[in-house]
Image (tube, rainbow, N blue to C red):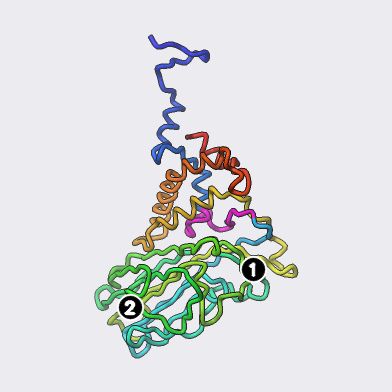
Amino acid sequence: MAKKNKAGNNKGKTSGARKNRQKKRGNGGIAMPSQLVKHVCSITDPFCVHAQGSKWPDGSALNSVPFQVKGQITFTLNLGTALCSLVIAPGLNYGFAQSTGIVAAVATYPVLTAYTGVSDLATQVTQYRLVSGGITITPVVSKMTSGGFIFCQEFAPGGNANLTTLNVDTKQCMSYYRQPLADDTPITYVFKSGGVDSRKFRAINSNNSQSSVDTNDYTFIQLYAVSDSAEGSTVAVVDYVFNYELVMLPSAFLNQIATPAAPKNDAIATISNAAIVNSSSFWSGTQDIVSKQMESAVYSALSSAKPAIKGVIGSTATAYGGPLAGTLVNTIMAGM
């Protein structure tokens, strides 16, 4: 007969509550509370329902306004040619441009254009930073009467890129994805951080301009399409979403709703960075599918971070700029 402990429970049996905790430990032995996953995904997945209003958790001294930008870009064939290309970057004031022509694999671009709803902010914002951003490319050509391919090129962060011209050769980039235009499955991309500098606030006109983009911050992409559709016709539509933090002028109307920064939490920031760096560059599928895959990447990053989190909460916590044993991290530890 099994012995009973002081509480009167059988030692030889596993309680229902403990079984539930064990079930939650399917990812590297860590109990994955929904609150933690929601917090990490809100700053990692731009399509997450919790991304709107999110702030990067570095304890910045600046009050800021979380601001989400959404819109759509129409991708059309250049007149007089069966080619077209489009460059997209996560800059606040200047973000995208469609080429005026492609000659010998080199695309020529006019000045960059601001995203919808952003141009009016240029005179009110002093500094900004991107929390997360992504796009979905959906081919819209007729499956029965049109053919061709769309190429998606990812360029690595590193210096200011002059976008007057840009090579469309698929070998001249960090990674690329190709899909027939007749396949109307959406292609989804999430912009990746370029390191510590990408998390710093910067003046709105410090690096981005109408002919260059600051790629020290994040990756940027170029879309290139070849089609037998009629010139000037639309081959794809690009839906974008960017989540920014804005520092407003004291006189700006939106400054009235500016709030303090999110509390510093290096553990959450590290897990978010690991999840996005280790994720695929391009996904085939809708934003909902990508969100599920991103959530899996967050679980994987959390599992890998388990030993580091334990060490941080222990004797080395102060090495990260302050104690990390807050509510979220304590929740992790409760299931370890």
Q: Of all residues shown, which one is farthest toward the top?
A: 1
Tell me the element at label 1.
strand
Q: Give amino acid for label 1.
A: Gln
Q: Is residue 152 left or right of residue 96?
A: left
Q: Quadrant of the N terminus?
A: top left
Q: Of all residues shown, which one is farthest toward the left?
A: 144
- Whether residue 305 is situated above or below residue 97 in the rendered picture: above
Marks 2 and 1, how far apart in space? 35 Å
- Whether residue 60 is situated above or below residue 227 in the rendered picture: above
- The residue beneath circle 1 is 127
Q: Is residue 141 left or right of residue 196?
A: left
What residue sits 33% from the left and 65% below the top?
A: 185
Mark 2 and 1 residues: CB-CB less than 8 Å, in contact?
no
Residue 11 in the image, given as x and y percentages of width and height: 43, 16
In depth, the one of 241 and 95 nearer the eye is 95
Q: Residues within 10 Å of mark 2 (few under 14, many from 20)?
A: some
What residue sits 40% from the left and 34% below the top?
A: 23
Whether 293 is among the magenta residues is: no
- Whether residue 165 is situated above or below residue 294 in the rendered picture: below
Residue 30 in the image, given as x and y percentages of width and height: 45, 38
Q: Residues within 10 Å of mark 1 (few under 14, many from 20)?
A: many
Residue 209 appears in which quarter of the rendering?
bottom right
Q: Magenta segment, which residues?
A: 42-59
What residue sits 47% from the left and 57% below the top?
A: 45
Whether 53 is among the magenta residues is: yes
- The residue beneath circle 2 is 169
* Magenta span dominant secondary structure: loop
